[in-house]
Image (cartoon, helix red, strand yellow):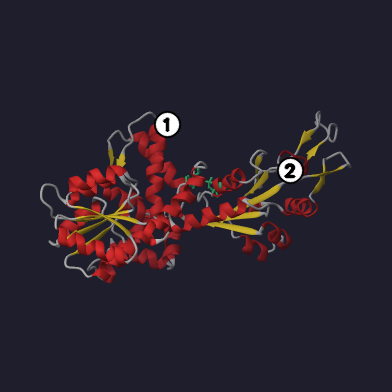
Amino acid sequence: MSEESIQILAVDDSPATLEVIARHLRGAGYTVFTCGSVEEAGTFLDEHSVDLVITDYKMPHSTGLDLIRYVRDHFKDTEIIMITGYPSIAGAVEAIRDGAGEYLAKPFTGEELLTVVAKIIDTQARRRLAQTEALDLSSYGIIGQSPDMLQVFSLIKKASQTNANVFISGESGTGKELVARAVHYNSDRRASAFVPVNCTAIPDTLLESELFGHVKGAFTGAKESRAGFFEIANGGTIFLDEIGDASLNLQGKLLRVMQSKEFCMVGSSRTRTVDTRIIAATHKDLRQLVDQGLFREDLYYRIHVLEIYIPPLHSRGDDIMALAMHFLQKFATEMNRPVPSFSDEALVALTQYAWPGNVRELENLVQRLVVISDEPVIEVRDLPEVMRFSIGRDRFGEKTLAEVEAEHIRYILARTGDNKSRAAEILGIDRKTLREKIKRLG
Ligand SMILES: Nc1ncnc2c1ncn2[C@@H]1O[C@H](COP(=O)(O)OP(=O)(O)OP(=O)(O)O)[C@@H](O)[C@H]1O
Ligand SMILES: [Mg+2]
């Protein structure tokens, strides 16, 4: 975006200050409008859309805070910078809470002003970009704004535009199936089937018939011909879920059909050709399985053309909050209830919890909370104990090493449900040492 196309409204009751601000900004190439009061600014904004509002805090009649609230309520995409000659922490906190992105204390130099403006315009541009990317995928129900998820979104896009085999990795509950569906439904295969196949669940005896189908009379009980997964997914996508659990027998069959794009139905010698896109997923470390001889290396390379790795939820920061809100809305609506909210402390607890079950665990928790709570606000005490424990875990303050150690041991014990072997493993000490420490702690 060029500077001239960026529109800025400056609001100040002092014509001299307005003049200085406008001069600096115009000097940098921005398009600048000025207003002498909050009322005037409100009228102006109703008719012009601007990218950024720079407002003075202290003005006669109504203050800059009123303007911030007005802009936040009516123009979600407009950024705000608050200027004040009365620097006060409280004022700044209030301004930021009410939606001012930045805070500039008088007196400031032209350079300081331009630095803050450039920074906020840059953030805005990134957010807008992220929103357009997220918008494309929102219909597939994937929530996420963290840099990690934006990366996942862009890989989904890339994968949708090719026919390459895709491998999706990530811990259990991170959304692998959701991503696989998004790739299929974004691709030009969307009119044909998306066929999920759970590699764990197919008994070896039925393998061939399940994958490739059978003709009538192929074996006892085969009263009708039946199409297999590959045939059903012809023109579409086959999703090989839990590929890490595929038996060597299954791996061999998959490899063959991937190489030749051909197969025979059970009981028939006629080869059939299929055009099926393959997406595979597992929460296991496939490379390690290859090294252990449990997974064929040739198959590994074949499915690994494009990898989409979904990081664990706890490392995705803001996504936890966004997902929590999303699920609240979803379940409350489903159950025909008013949508509750989380208290600030409850949100902190959610963002600090480790989420070993990832998004699935969060989804289940929120569903339970919506079912059991009839209060409009969900408080920390409504959360499971393991989550309450995690509050403030990054603020050890003035504690001694011994205190921190004790607290951490208690936390891990609570998280593991008092499973001492598991706790010792996480803490990296043997069980005997852990027992001694617990005894000392009482
Ligand atoms: N980013 C997300 N936005 C919204 N819902 C999500 C997201 N990620 C996961 N979910 C939801 O979480 C649940 C688990 O997701 P999914 O089944 O895709 O995980 P998975 O990685 O395949 O897990 P597993 O390895 O256990 O099979 C689903 O209900 C899914 O809809
Ligand atoms: Mg899955």
Q: Are marks 2 and 1 in contact (CB under 8 Å)?
A: no
Kind of residue indicated by mark 1? Glu
User: Mark 2 or mark 1: which comes first in sequence?
Assistant: 2
Taking the image as shown, residue 66 lies to the left or right of residue 317, namely: left
Crowd around label 2: few <14 · some 14–19 · many ≥20 (10 Å): many
Quarter location, residue 4: bottom left
Quarter location, residue 109: bottom left
Task: Tell me the element at label 1.
Answer: helix
Task: Using the rendered image of the protein, determine whether residue 13 is visible from the camera's viewpoint.
Answer: yes
The extreme left residue here reads 60
Residue bearing mark 2: 230
Q: Position of residue 295 (x, y in %)?
A: 69, 59
Residue bearing mark 1: 334
Q: Residue at x 35, y 30 (%)?
A: 337
**In this rendering, is residue 307 above or below 346?**
below
Task: Using the rendered image of the protein, determine whether residue 295 is visible from the camera's viewpoint.
Answer: no
Quarter location, residue 264: top right
Task: Tell me the element at label 2.
Answer: helix
Where, quadrant-wise, is the N terminus in this rendering?
A: bottom left
Q: Nearer the viewer, residue 441 or 283?
A: 283
Q: Nearer the viewer, residue 67 or 277?
A: 67
Q: Is mark 2 within 8 Å of ligand 2?
A: no
Q: Is mark 1 within 8 Å of ligand 1?
A: no
Where, quadrant-wise, is the C terminus in this rendering?
A: bottom left
Kind of residue indicated by mark 2? Phe
Q: Position of residue 55 (x, y in %)?
A: 21, 55
Q: Position of residue 205 (x, y in %)?
A: 76, 43
Crowd around label 1: few <14 · some 14–19 · many ≥20 (10 Å): few
Q: Residue at x 30, y 48 (%)?
A: 346
